[in-house]
Amino acid sequence: MAGVRIERLVTSGVFTLDDGTWNVDNNVWIVGDDHDAVVIDAAHDADAIAEAVGDRRLIAIVCTHAHNDHVNAAPALAAATGAPILLHLDDRVLWKHTHPERDPDGYLSDNQRIKVAGTQLRVLHTPGHTTGAISLHLPEFGTVFTGDTLFAGGPGATGRSYSHFPTIIRSIRDRLLVLPPTTLVRTGHGSDTTIGDEARHLTERITRGC
């Protein structure tokens, strides 16, 4: 694991779903060393992501879920680098909303390991924001990448197509809050938080129902 690092790139663009449109900033995460890397959520700008990866071998483009703001640059990045696009099987229908002519290259399953630079990202199926939403746990670094499942301040949005509030609460309670309280939560949008901080807010969010 010597030399392994986690990099954040913020890209900007448009998110569309259910006839709504929002301007958003996305966190694109790069995990790797000087030789190999994995990209988590290829959002908006394939050229900027490829530049951040540099001359490293891109092992995979991992999608935490298939909302267009998290996958819209994935095919172009895959074409530029030869890396496969990986997505949870349960989000394949949602993926087609953005890329009807291009399938992912592989489908992820719960507890699958993605190897990079001498370490492993463990896939946690955390549905609720979408049916195929995943998080990626990197235990050696005390880190979990949660996409839009968990943010600083609580769960990701529900109330849209393919989302379900009770399901996201179960995912957070049963798959994420069981991680050590000091685990750093690296999110799909906005600032980092910790599992311990978010555990204190969960009851309040359940009561509010959003």
Image (spheres, grey):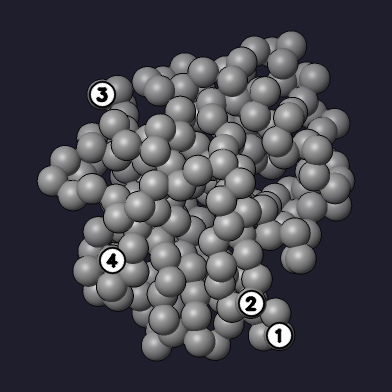
Vertical relation: 140 (above or below) 111: below
Vertical relation: 31 (above or below) 43: below
**Between discs 3 and 2, the one toward the N terminus:** 3
Dot 4: element: helix
Question: On the picture, is 139 further left or further right than 25?
Answer: right
Q: Position of residue 100 (x, y in %)?
A: 16, 41
Please state which amino acid type lies under the numbered disc 2. Gly
Please tell me which residue is depicted at 79% across the width and 29% down the height of the picture. 201
Please state which amino acid type lies under the numbered disc 4. Ala
For label 2, count other residues whose C-alpha is less than 10 Å away and answer few (under 14), some (14-19) or many (20+): few
How far apart marks 2 and 1 lie (CA) works out to: 8 Å
Q: Position of residue 191 (x, y in %)?
A: 64, 52
Which residue is label 2 attached to?
118
**Between discs 2 and 4, the one toward the N terminus:** 4
Quadrant assignment, res 82: bottom left
Please state which amino acid type lies under the numbered disc 3. Asp
Q: Contact, CB < 8 Å: mark 1 with mark 4? A: no
Which residue is label 3 attached to?
19
For label 3, count other residues whose C-alpha is less than 10 Å away and answer few (under 14), some (14-19) or many (20+): few
Answer yes or no: is residue 161 visible. Answer: yes
Dot 1: element: loop
Task: Find residue 2 and name its label.
Answer: 1
Please state which amino acid type lies under the numbered disc 1. Ala
**Between discs 1 and 4, the one toward the N terminus:** 1
